[in-house]
Image (cartoon, rainbow, N blue to C red):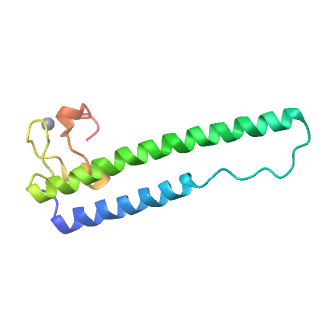
Amino acid sequence: MPVPLKIALDLLADHRIEIKKDAHLTSLSPCSVKRLDSDNSRRLVRMNNLQGRAKAKAIRFLNEQDLLRIERAFDRMENGNFGYCIKCDAKIPLTQLEQDPAKSLCPNCDGSQNED
Ligand SMILES: [Zn+2]
């Protein structure tokens, strides 16, 4: 196993906590509007709220995807497959796992071979 289990677990657990914190923040309702001067400002406020909600939804979606990736990484750890590409079984470089412990593809399979 390329990454000591303890370190990988810590990284993943930290990342999961961060995501859950973000998810909590974005799920808070948009701030209430206290001052409405005209139809125009009212319309602007409404647009801002809509955009804010769409953005929060997008962030939540991304966080859910991330959480799923992390849960899968925990599963791979339990199965003893953590750190190996799910496509070709090659070892995923430690440097890449340090950047993204939930990474499931080797540089060859995810097309990032040149990044190193
Ligand atoms: Zn691969």
Return the x and y of residue 40 as percentages of the image width and height. Answer: 86, 32
- Residues 36 and 80: in front is 36
Marks counted in the figure total 0
Say left or right for 58 vs 14.
Answer: right
Query: Where is the C terminus found, in terms of image quarters?
Result: top left
Residue 1 appears in the figure? no
Residue 27 as seen in the image, left or right of residue 63: right
Q: Please give the name of the residue rendered at 26% of the width and 53% of the height, measured from the top-left corner.
A: 71
- Where residue 5 sits in the image (x, y, percent)? 16, 65
- Foreground of the two, 85 or 43: 43
Residue 33 lies left or right of residue 103; in this view the side is right
Q: In this view, does 13 lie above or below 114?
A: below
* Residue at 21% from the left image edge and 37% from the top image edge: 107
Question: Ligand 1 appears in which quadrant?
Answer: top left
- In the image, 69 versus 101, the foreground residue is 69
User: Taking the image as drawn, is residue 112 in sight?
Assistant: yes
Give the residue at the far right of this rendering.
37
Q: Where is residue 46 in the image (x, y as percent from the top left)?
A: 74, 37
Residue positioned 43% across, 59% down in the render = 20
Residue 104 occupies quadrant: top left
| Percent x, y of residue 81 | 10, 51
Q: In which quarter of the image is the N terminus?
A: bottom left
Q: In this view, does 19 lie to the left or right of 75?
A: right
Give the residue displayed 28% in from the left and 47% down from the top: 69
